[in-house]
Amino acid sequence: MSESSLSRRLATLRDGVRFLSRAVGSRYTPLLAQVVVTRRCNLACGYCNEYDDFSPPVPLADLLARVDHLAALKTASITFTGGEPLLHPDLDKVIRAARNHGMIVTMITNGFRLSRAWIDRLNAAGLQGMQISIDNLKPDEISMKSLSSVENRLGLLSKHARFKVNVNSVLGVSGERTQDVITVAETAAKYGLQHSVGVLHDHHGTLKPLSPAQMQAYETVTKISPSLVHTLNYRLFQKNLMHGRSNDWKCRAGARYLYVTEDGSVHWCSQQRGYPAIALLDYTREDIKREYHTEKGCSPTCTLSCVHQVSLFDRYRGRQNIPDPTTARPAIAVAAE
């Protein structure tokens, strides 16, 4: 093992210990923040409501201030997202700033703008994980995130990335494309990359039922690429939802999980934008405590794996005795699916 490889492994171990200590040792520290660096995306997938085609990148100074404040809140990990985060010219500088604070840093991308130069910049910045989204073999009006468009980038990542790469696919995008998810999983395995599968949610983050063929594809994919993530997601929430049952759990969005939009405000998640809508730089431990103890009426049929995962540590502690404040407000307007 090379000295640089050993150093990365030791850093990963150190970060993991820090994450667990904050997960177990305190209820009021964020475990994951998803930060939008630009709402703009270079694609226009029919099922997505998390993008536009005109927003400028968030100014670097603003992003650095948000990273600093998340560090002050003792946030354990951060994921940079969009839109398409690789449309931000200074993404690597923001990643480096978060790593300098000791946070675990990952990103989500469609992969279209990946290049050897970008991979080298992300390596140098200390990126630790990348999720690249691929839904089908060829682009269609529902999803443009196709294997044919980015397979050469998977090869580049396999050869040059010093960070972990997970290829993620979504089941339920299109019945005709169900088998494509299996081919994507097989291709990821060919390049030595991990693969995970999610289930499509509507604009409230709730499940769209899977057909028998999609259920079979899900089982096949999890055998091609077995992982702790697959097992955890299935047992935490996917099993019940795929069989038409709701889940009884305590969603800690706004506390353990923060979704920070491009304007710098905190929301429960990407699918429940509109509350609490407080500027991150004004977000305090008191806000975290309030949202930790607040019920979320959307939680029984929620499919957002990241929120389920970070809420797991508080499954049996911390009563939620504050009623859902969003039930009386109109639904937020989002892009059509």
Image: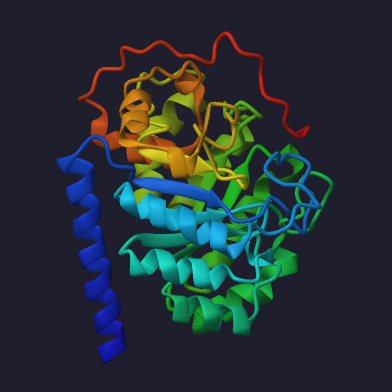
> What kind of colouring is applied to the model shown?
rainbow
From what the image shows, is residue 282 above or below residue 208? below
Residue 290 sits in which quadrant? top left
Q: Position of residue 262 (x, y in %)?
A: 62, 48
Q: In the picture, which quadrant includes the C terminus?
A: top right
Q: Is residue 76 visible?
A: no
Compared across the picture, whether 124 is left or right of 28 comes to right
Q: Position of residue 125 (x, y in %)?
A: 45, 76
Residue 80 versus residue 45: which sits nearer the camera?
80
Image mark count = 0
Q: Position of residue 256 (x, y in %)?
A: 35, 38
Residue 31 versus residue 222: which sits nearer the camera?
31
From what the image shows, is residue 246 above or below residue 82? above
Residue 95 versus residue 109: which sits nearer the camera?
95
From what the image shows, is residue 5 above or below residue 336? below
Q: In the picture, which quadrant includes the N terminus?
A: bottom left
Residue 38 sits in which quadrant? bottom right
Q: Position of residue 222 (x, y in %)?
A: 45, 49
Q: Residue at x 75, y 67 (%)?
A: 149
Q: Residue at x 45, y 32 (%)?
A: 238
Farthest-out residue, bottom: 2
Q: Residue at x 47, y 67 (%)?
A: 95
Q: Is residue 64 visible?
A: yes
Farthest-out residue, right: 141
Q: Residue at x 58, y 37 (%)?
A: 270
From what the image shows, is residue 314 above or below residue 88? above
